[in-house]
Image: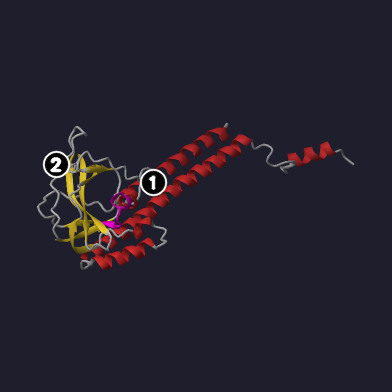
């Protein structure tokens, strides 16, 4: 019987692969393929996620338009919707927001305190959004009412001089909004009053913190009236900070990066295997 070496030689010459078929494949090549697939899949997944967000934003925009066309709600109706939304377990945070509903109330300011939401930008100008707290009835939750945008002084120590609305009853009609909490900074961070006439500057609309500050429950929605008595300040309205078109643009960028990355890695692989 012929030796095993002779048999192996004959098999090899006839084109039959013997031994470990992956022996000639280096570890570096395997890692190269794995890294290429992982990074390419990640880039494509990010692009698909941006497309899904764009679809959701288009649906959310349609919802806002429908709410604007509805009849203004009473305060009791709004409180009922607030309670339902807070009990919701929807996976999309925006769907729990009540932004865009119309509201009509008869209310009065609870005091003369003016509140200024810091770090706001309107038409390229930095400033504040001014608010007063209003009472509908003593038993019901109070509500924040936006008075409008106020430009900031270059010296942050100088706050805008605003005249608060008198503690009379006003009929206010407008749209409500809620801001999504910022995961990086959602604290109220209200500054101490220098005197009773100094506005309170704060950093975020934190309803629980405001409730503790005033010692009275506040509803989670903020009212932006169509017309504020004795005020003519601009009222920015940006219910969707990032539009569907921007999400589509970001998706195109991710897909382009995926295509470029795959092309680059294919070129490198071709050069290496050709050697």
Which residues fall within the magenta stretch?
A: 211-222
Crowding near the residue tagged with mark 2, few <14, some 14–19, many ≥20 C-alpha atoms within 10 Å: few
Q: Is tag 1's residue or tag 2's residue first in the polypeptide sequence? A: 2
The image's mark for residue 161 is: 2
Q: Position of residue 130 (x, y in %)?
A: 20, 47
User: Where's the C terminus, which quadrant?
Assistant: top right
Identify the element where label 1 is drawn. loop
Instruction: Give residue 225's mark.
Output: none
The residue lying at 43 percent from left, 48 percent from top is 46
Residue 188 or 197: which is nearer the viewer?
197
Give the number of the disc on residue 183.
Answer: 1
Q: Quadrant of residue 15?
A: top right
**x and y percentages locating residue 162 in the rendered image:** 14, 44
Q: Quadrant of residue 118?
A: top left
Give the residue furthest to the right. Answer: 1
Q: Is residue 147 above or below residue 2?
A: below
Q: Nearer the viewer, residue 45 or 207?
A: 207
Asked if residue 266 lies left or right of residue 199, the reply is right
Q: What is the C-alpha distance between the residues marked 1 and 2?
A: 32 Å
Q: Is residue 153 above or below residue 45?
A: above
């Amino acid at each position: 019987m012929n030796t095993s070496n002779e048999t192996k030689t004959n098999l090899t010459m006839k084109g039959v692969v013997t031994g470990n078929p992956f022996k000639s494949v280096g570890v570096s090549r395997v890692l190269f393929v794995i890294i290429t697939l992982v990074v390419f899949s990640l880039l494509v997944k990010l692009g698909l996620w941006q497309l899904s967000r764009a679809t959701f934003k288009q649906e959310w925009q349609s919802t806002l338009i429908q709410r604007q066309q509805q009849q203004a709600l009473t305060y009791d109706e709004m409180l009922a919707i607030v309670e339902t939304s807070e009990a919701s377990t929807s996976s999309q945070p925006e769907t729990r927001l009540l932004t865009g509903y119309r509201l009509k109330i008869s209310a009065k300011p609870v005091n003369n305190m003016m509140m200024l939401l810091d770090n706001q930008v309107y038409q390229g100008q930095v400033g504040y959004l001014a608010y007063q707290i209003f009472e509908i009835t003593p038993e019901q939750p109070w509500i924040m009412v936006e008075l409008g945008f106020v430009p900031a002084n270059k010296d942050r120590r100088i706050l805008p001089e605003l005249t608060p609305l008198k503690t009379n009853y006003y009929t206010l009609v407008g749209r409500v909004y809620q801001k999504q909490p910022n995961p990086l900074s959602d604290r109220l961070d209200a500054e101490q009053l220098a005197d009773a006439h100094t506005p309170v500057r704060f950093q975020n609309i934190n309803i629980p913190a405001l409730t503790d500050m005033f010692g009275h429950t506040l509803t989670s929605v903020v009212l932006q009236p169509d017309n504020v008595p004795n005020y003519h300040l601009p009222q920015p309205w940006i219910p969707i900070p990032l539009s569907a078109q921007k999400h589509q643009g970001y998706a195109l960028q991710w897909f382009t990066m995926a295509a470029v990355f795959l092309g680059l890695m294919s070129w490198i692989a071709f050069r290496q295997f050709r050697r």
